[in-house]
Amino acid sequence: FNNSYIYIYYALPENSSITVQGNIMFADRTTRNPFITCIQMTYFYLMKNATLFINDNVMNVSSQTGGAVRALYFASDTEIGESSSVAIFRNKLVANGNIDGSLFYIDDAYLEAVNSSLVVTSNSFTATSTDSIDAFHTEYVFSDYDVLYTGQTGYFSFSNNFVNVTSGDASGRAIYFNDPYYLHFYIDNNQIYYNVGTAVRMDYSDLFNAFSISGNTFQYTNASSITSDVILVDTFYLFSNSSYVVSNNKVIASSVTTTDAKLISAGSIAFDNNNFDNSTLIASCGNTLPWAASPTLDQLFSAAIVAYTVELCGPVTTSSPSFAHPRHVVVGIVCFILTIFIFIL
C-alpha cells in the first residue's frame, strides 16, 4: 500500500499499543514508481499512554536507477502524546545502489511533552550509494516551548546504534538533524563509520532541557585525509537552565593532514531571549582526536563554543567521569581540607 510493505495511518487510541516486530522486507525501486519504503507512518498520532514499538525487523532497500528510497519513514506530522512513546530498536536497515535518500527519515515529530519519548536505540544502519545518502535524517523533532521552563519537554535519544555510511556525496553527512528543539536530546554511545564530509550535521540546535553527545566513536573511513569538522552545527542555541555534556567521544582517522578540524564546530552561539546565566555549561571531558590524544578545548571546539565550555574532569581519563558544577568541586575541596584538619587534631 502506498509503495510500502507496512503502512500505519492516523491515530492510536489511549492506553493502546502497536508492535511491528520480526519482519523481513526487501524493496527494490529499480522497476517501481517514485520512492518506496518498507515501513511508513503518515499523520500518525499516539494518544495518551500509547506505545509504538518497531523492533527486530530487517529493512533492505535498493535501486539501480536512482531516486529516493527510505527504509523507515515517518511522514507528515507524527505526534506523540502525553506519557506515550515510540521505540525503534534492534532493527537492521540496509540500503545499496544508486540512491538519493535516507535509511530512516522523520518528517516532523511533535513530542507533546510530559513524559513523551522517541527512542532510536541498538539498531544497525548500513548505507552504500553512488549518490547522496544518509543513515538517519530528521526534520523538526520538537516539543512544547510552554513546558521548556518546567523541564517537562519530550525525550529524544539516538543511542547505541551502529552506523556505516558510504556515500557518493563527499561533502555529505552520515546523520542529519534539521532544527531539533525544546527537548531532552541525547546522541550517546554510537559507533559511526563515515566516508563523507561530516559525521553529524545540525542546522540549528535550539534550547534543550538536557543535551548530550557522549561516548560516541566517529571513524572516518575515507582513504583521503580527514579535513572537515566531525559535528557541524549552524547555530547553537543554549538554554540557561540546562546542562550540555560532550564527553568521552573518540575520533579515528587513518590519515590526517589538518589540525584545524574540530569535534564540534558552530557558526554562532545564541540564547533564549539573549539571556545567558552561568548555570549554562558545555561540559567537556575525555574526548580524543587523532591529532590530539589529550586535546585542549580550542582543539575540540570552534571559538564560539569554547567561550561557553568548561573542562570539568581535568586530564583525559579512560574511565567515565562524574560531571559536577564548579561550585560542587569547591565544596568538595573544602570538605577534604577540613577532614585532614580534624584528623590532625
Image (spheres, helix red, strand yellow):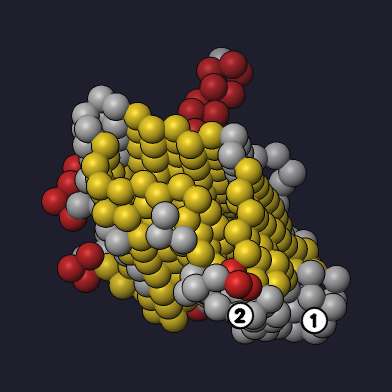
- Residue 297 is at least partly visible in this image: no
Measuring 46% from the left and 61% from the top, which residue is drawn there? 3
Crowding around mark 2 (Cα neighbors within 10 Å: few <14, some 14 to 19, many 20+) is some
Q: Is residue 180 left or right of residue 318?
A: left
Q: What is the number of callouts on the image?
A: 2
Q: At which x and y percent is residue 314?
A: 63, 51
135 is higher (above) or lower (below) than 131: above
Closer mark to the observer between disc 2 and disc 1:
2
Q: Mark 1 points at which residue?
A: 225
Q: At which x and y percent is residue 205?
A: 37, 66
Amino acid type of the residue that numbered disc 1 sits on in the rendered structure: Ser
> What quarter of the picture does the N terminus occupy?
bottom left
Q: Nearer the viewer, residue 149 or 24?
A: 24
Crowding around mark 1 (Cα neighbors within 10 Å: few <14, some 14 to 19, many 20+) is some
Q: At which x and y percent is residue 345?
A: 56, 15
Residue 66 numbered mark, or none: 2
Residue farthest front in this picture: 31
**SS category of the residue bearing label 1:** loop
